[in-house]
């Protein structure tokens, strides 16, 4: 199981920095290939809304 910070999701959805975007894509590819379970902190929705809102 791995906990993914909200900033990682923001980097995956919005390309503010091409380098960070590529790193995040690779990160999620590894997670998928390894079959790891992803969980978010309880405050994920609040942080995400604040980050993109």
Image (tube, rainbow, N blue to C red):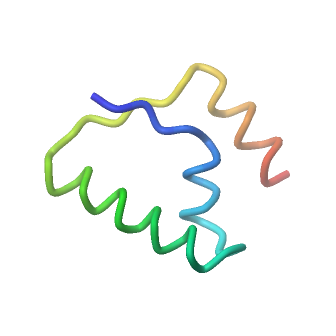
Q: Residue at x 54, y 24 (%)?
A: 41
Q: Quadrant of the N terminus?
A: top left
Q: Residue at x 72, y 73 (%)?
A: 16
Q: How many marks?
A: 0
In the displayed structure, does residue 7 sit left or right of residue 26?
A: right
On screen, residue 28 above or below 23 = above
Q: Residue at x 66, y 23 (%)?
A: 43
In the displayed structure, does residue 32 sit left or right of residue 13?
A: left
Residue 9: x and y in percent read 56, 52
On screen, residue 31 above or below 42 = below
In the image as oriented, which residue stretches furthest toward the top?
42
In the image as oriented, which residue stretches furthest toward the front?
19
On screen, residue 15 above or below 44 = below
Q: Quadrant of residue 52?
A: bottom right
In the image as oriented, which residue stretches furthest toward the bottom?
18
Residue 48: x and y in percent read 70, 42
Q: Residue at x 34, y 36 (%)?
A: 38
In the image as oriented, which residue stretches furthest toward the left?
34
Q: Quadrant of residue 30?
A: bottom left
């Amino acid at each position: 199981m791995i906990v993914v910070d909200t900033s990682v999701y923001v980097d995956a959805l919005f390309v503010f920095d091409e380098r960070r975007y590529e790193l995040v894509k690779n990160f999620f590819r590894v997670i998928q290939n390894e079959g790891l379970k992803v969980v978010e902190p309880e405050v994920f929705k609040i942080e995400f809304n604040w980050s993109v809102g």
